[in-house]
Image (cartoon, coloured by chain):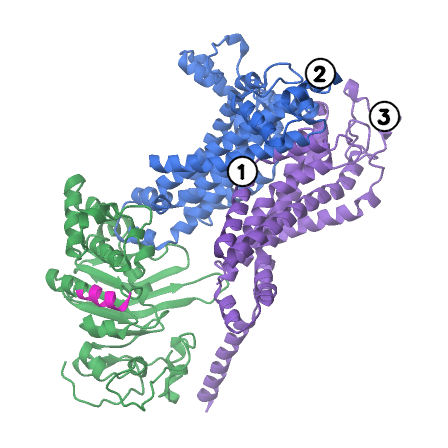
Chain colours: A purple, B green, C blue
Amino acid sequence: MSVKTDKIDRLSELSAVKQEEQGVSLWTEAFRRLRRSPSAIIGASILLIFVIVAIIGPWVAPYSPTDTIGIREGVVKSGQGIIPGASAEHWLGYDHQGRDLFSRMLVGARQTLLVGVISTLIGLTIGAIIGGIAGAAAGLGGRVGRWVDNVLMRFVDIMLALPSLLLAVSIAALLGASLTTVMIAVGLVSVPIFARLLRGAMLAQSGGDYVLAATSLGVTRRRIALTHIVPNSLAPVIVQATLTLATAIIEAAALSFLGLGNPDSSVPEWGVMLADAQSYLGIRPGLAIYPALGIIITALGFTLLGEAMREALDPKLRK
Amino acid sequence: MPLLDVKDLSVTFARRGQRTVRAVDGVSFSVEAGQVVGLVGESGCGKSVTSLALMGLLPKQRGVTVGGSAIFADDTDLLKTDERTMRDIRGRDVAMIFQDPLSSLNPVVPIGVQVTEVLTRHRGMTGDAARKEATDLLNKVGIPDPTRRLKEYPHQLSGGMRQRALIAMAVACKPRLLIADEPTTALDVTIQAQILELLRGLVRESGTALIMITHDLGVVAGICDTVNVLYAGRVVESARRKPLFAEPRHPYTHGLLGSVPRLDSGRGEKLHAIRGSVRDVLPWPDGCAFAPRCDRQVDACVGEPPALVEGIHRHAYRCVNPEPATAEVSS
Amino acid sequence: MIRFIVRRLLQLIPTLFGLSILLFTWLHRLPGGPETAILGERGTPELRAQIRANLGLDEPILVQYGRFMQRMLKLDLGTSISTKREVTTEFIERFPGTVELTVMAMIIAIGVGIPLGYLAARRRGSFLDSASVGGSLIGICVPVFFLAYVLKAIFSEQLHLFPSSGRQDPTLGATRITNFFVLDGLMTREWDAALDALWHLVLPGIALASIPLAIIVRITRASVLEVLSEDYVRTAKSKGLTESTIRGRHILRNAMLPIVTVIGLLTGGLLSGAVLTETVFAFSGIGAFLKDAISNLDYPVLMGFIMIIAVVYLLVNLLVDVSYSLIDPRVRVR
């Protein structure tokens, strides 16, 4: 009978849907949601362009970023307030030392990316170590465990409120002003976020029912840590790292502006370029506007992607 | 005329890119003053949505549509009244008690303020008069040492106390209709009995009508006068309490009763479990939604939705192959 | 409540102790040691040796730490290398300007941010919501000093709506009492002076407020959205309460908890931002002074700055804790 077969079809269809839903893993599901999020796509596109420029920039740059052509050819006299703007040969004009601004922007992308990535890695590594120890200590429990956790988190709390400027000033006093100082300072600022995140994730995961279930099945602690806790803590760390890249680039620019960055402006980095431009704003605002736009758009890219990832991975928002 | 007459209530949720969900689909029932009416069913059957629709508390956004009518006290249609008027009705004429007493109380405001704010809003009481009335209310719902409790915060109260406090807020203005959405689910068994006893007392004393929403048949047996069993958004069986328990006609009701262990059943007898889960439903237009899980399903179950059959003593069920009527029952 | 504050103050002691050790270590690790910190590069070898002896650098480390603490407690920070004046005096003169600017920025950020975030959450998905979410994203990504330049170029240099630099028109000859110019104006009833000082605060205030504003909008929106889905808001609605009671007592009061925490955390960053903004607007707070101190490695000034930040942090933290416990009874018990 047709109704009967119809019904069987429908029932098997129902059970098929169920299995498929169960089979979708956290990452596949998150990725699927990411692809549908417009802000993730905009963010990822910006970053893709940025990374491509960072990789090929130095090769495609029409001029050397350190060559003071403008001064050699006598076109640029910044002392007298003469810095020519865009032309057919120099798409964005010269900078105050007669170097080709377009080439400096292209080469600067790589430096900027490096500053962001290295600072974030510094923060991530130190934060992960502190957070990991605190989380493990708290997880082990006992008097000593709680004490270690308390002291570490107290320390992290203090760091959380310290402005990057303060750290940078202290570090610059020890090491002198340089891009390294800036990267260390910016990295240290993000330590507390990563430490708290990792500790929180570890504590939440180790208290999770599935960890309890795994323990009761006789799975060893190390195996639980490797197969359950680490992968589950990874997602928030990746999200935070993406967001931190944005703030790192902006922070680095601010510190460069205060003269804590590279005193030798031959290495083009957008933050340093922006800082160098302060004295020539009245003559040629473009000197500040182009690097600033570069920083803003890149930071926006990281923020958009990071926020979209956070949303995609948030179990509360998942239906 | 009944105090509340719900006719053909339906609620649909439409979301972009997803199938439209009919959470409540043509539900009708009525409530008389002083009566306790049960809405029974598993989670997801539409019972809570029904209560929120009656209170006008469903999210007001595109995609949420409410149809049908719910005539309250002969003149007001709760589904079509504007928000301003509803605000006057809520808490004064119709009040609600929720499932989880801890999350339903504001954690950062003292109990006293949460009780008196209803009195201030609907009865214009302020200051000492409101405090005095709040003390009396807490007393009435069986909270010891009410003057002290008024100054305390929800986290300082036990689960049972919190639910009593919520009930005090709900009955503060002597509403004519009380809706209780799983009021005992989050509580310990002994506390559950006390809260049910309290509700029963309040109904008996004040003549308030009560809609009891629950999945717990024990609660139904203990308090309800009439029962509506919901499945996938429709009423599948409705009857007075005794006939329903003695002689359930719909296989779903039968299954629900059969899945409760009984002392008087034989030792070797198996518990009767309903197959599958609430998610294995057939859309109503294609037949009986319960068919995929039903032991008694026949060919006629699929094709078109079964109509509501009215039996003796207003015992109605929605099934083409009902459980046989066995014993004679007087209602 | 008082017992709570006292307990919190007592809990600050270990933190202060830890901080002093950090500072002490820092001072000793400086290139050239503490004698350079006091004398600067110019000190002759004889002078250096004398200072070393005076400081007791040959004595055991604990004794040295004791002396260091003594100096710190007496607020004796030494003399600035570049201005040759007492660092404490310099800060007393300059810090009020920075505080004024920071407070102005905080007022803008909180006053605009909380209502905007609330409205965005209540009208989720509306144009206002998308605009404030998008705007706050951009707000976070624009470097403060660049925004300061842009504001200055548009609103003071092009449109001449606001002054482009300074804290007050010097031709007013306003009386100075506390070095808080707005406060001074109010105290001496020189209304035009107070107003002029306030007028000078607008543009730098907006520039400095941009990042905190963006963060407050976002956290308020998220927090209100979270609270809106809470059961107790539904309970409040089921009681038929008025919109304003639900908003104030049931939504905002609960949503304030994370907002207060974030405001506390923002203060540190705000001080850094203030230094940047002041530089752009030639606003005589600690900004330009500090910028010079950084390039000259003026250690006494840097140390003073570190101490000020530490004290401000501790005070703000205390304030956050107190207001937190005022809002949430669950914190008070512990």
Task: Report crowding for label 2: few under 14, some 14 to 19, many 20 or more residues within 10 A (C-alpha).
Answer: few
Residue B193 is covered by the magenta coloring: yes
Q: Is residue B184 above or below residue C117?
A: below
Residue at image point 43% right, 77% down:
B280
Q: Secondary structure at mark 3?
A: helix
Depth order, front residue of A77/B60: A77
- Relative vertical location of residue B268 with respect to residue C19 in this rendering, above or below: below
Mark closest to the chain's N terminus, 3 or 1: 3
Q: Position of residue B156 (x, y in %)?
A: 29, 51
Q: Which quadrant holds residue A168?
A: top right
Kind of residue at badge 2: Leu
Q: Is residue A151 left or right of residue B57?
A: right
The type of residue carrying mark 3 is Ile
Instruction: Specify the subunit that label 2 lies on.
Output: C
Q: Which residues are magenta?
A: B188-197
Q: Position of residue C234 (x, y in %)?
A: 32, 54
Question: Residue A71 has which mark?
Answer: 3
Q: Residue furthest front?
A: C59
- In the rendered image, residue C10, in percent from the top left (x then y), is placed at 43, 36
**Disc 3 and disc 2: Cα gap in Å?**
47 Å
Asked whether the viewer can see residue B173, the reply is no
The image shows residue B142, relative to residue B125, as above or below, that is: below
Q: Disc 1 marks which residue?
A: A161
- The chain under label 1 reads A
Circle nearer the viewer, 3 or 1 = 1
Q: Write down the residue under mark 2.
A: C47
Marks 3 and 2 share the same chain? no
Q: Amino acid at mark 1?
A: Ala
Tell me, yes or no, whether the highlighted magenta stretch contains residue A267: no
Q: In terms of depth relative to the viewer, which is nearer, C199 or C123?
A: C199
| Res A282 label | none
Task: Tell me: A190 left or right of B36.
Answer: right
